[in-house]
Amino acid sequence: MLAEVLNADAPDDLTTRERVKRAARKLFALNGVDVAVRDIVREAGGKNVSALNYYFGSKEELIETLIHDALAAADARWDEALTALEAAGGPNSVREVVEILVLRGLPPNAGEGDEASARFFATLLHTRRHLVTDTVARLGFSAYDRALRHVRRLMPPMPDAAKDQRLLFYFWASSSIFAVLEGALDENGDYLEPWSAPNPLSNFIDAAVAMLEAPLTAPIKNIRKGSSAPESAKTGRRV
């Protein structure tokens, strides 16, 4: 009955569930996660607000499902690429790892079904960061942490606290840039100015590698000895 309410042409409940997820991801990305349930259902083509609770239990559980969907796919791609690189004796440079993180992560030009994932994730990080970290810690995604361990090992010598900061710089910069690029795509999937040339992902990789590998100029005495690393904004664990 709920499938009929949401989508008269839906062949099964999976299609209805996917419609709700896509509508929620789009509205969360554009308007934040305080969007009313009735607006999500309306965007999905339905009228009955109980549909969301029927499929997901609550709006919070829907948000957790969307986090899982986005990061599970990215984690699988990161794991596959890292495993291949490790089997070949790598990684041997910061660039090799950053290329995997950028090109195999949350792509701004995602295909149908993953639209607005980058903006959704960036919005959550700025408004519900603890929901993201708690969800990720519970689900146990590991490939991102594995990649960061490789980056840390390959970075130039500097105090751990400085490496911690730079890895957080990278994380926040990448999540924001992916969201901006996702919003800069036209109807043909091409980037609008000023992102059309050079290739923005390749250029960002260059910038990220430079940031991670740049010599430390901050006075060492200003870095507290024995200070613990900040929690990873993405995993809730030490990066």
Image (spheres, rainbow, N blue to C red):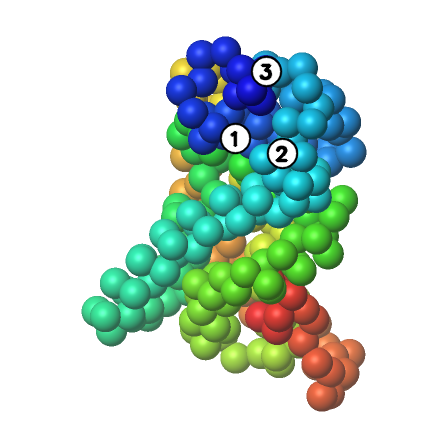
Q: Count neighbours of disc 3 (C-alpha within 10 A) and say few if under 14, some if 14 to 19, many if 20 or more.
A: some
* Type of amino acid under label 3: Val
Residue under the image location 50 percent in, 44 percent down: 70
Q: Are marks 3 and 2 in contact (CB under 8 Å)?
A: no
Front residue of 139/78: it is 139
How crowded is the residue under tag 1: few (<14 C-alpha within 10 Å), some, or many (20+)? some
Q: Position of residue 72 (x, y in %)?
A: 46, 51
Q: Which of the pair 92/2 is nearer the observer?
A: 2
The percent coordinates of residue 178 (x first, y second) are: 54, 39
Identify whether 220 is placed above or below 186.
Answer: below
Q: Residue at x 53, y 49 (%)?
A: 68
Q: Give the x, y percent position of residue 20.
A: 57, 27
Q: Quadrant of residue 91?
A: bottom left
Question: How far separated are the C-alphas under marks 1 and 3?
Answer: 12 Å
Residue that protrudes farthest toward the bottom in the picture: 226
What residue does disc 1 label?
17
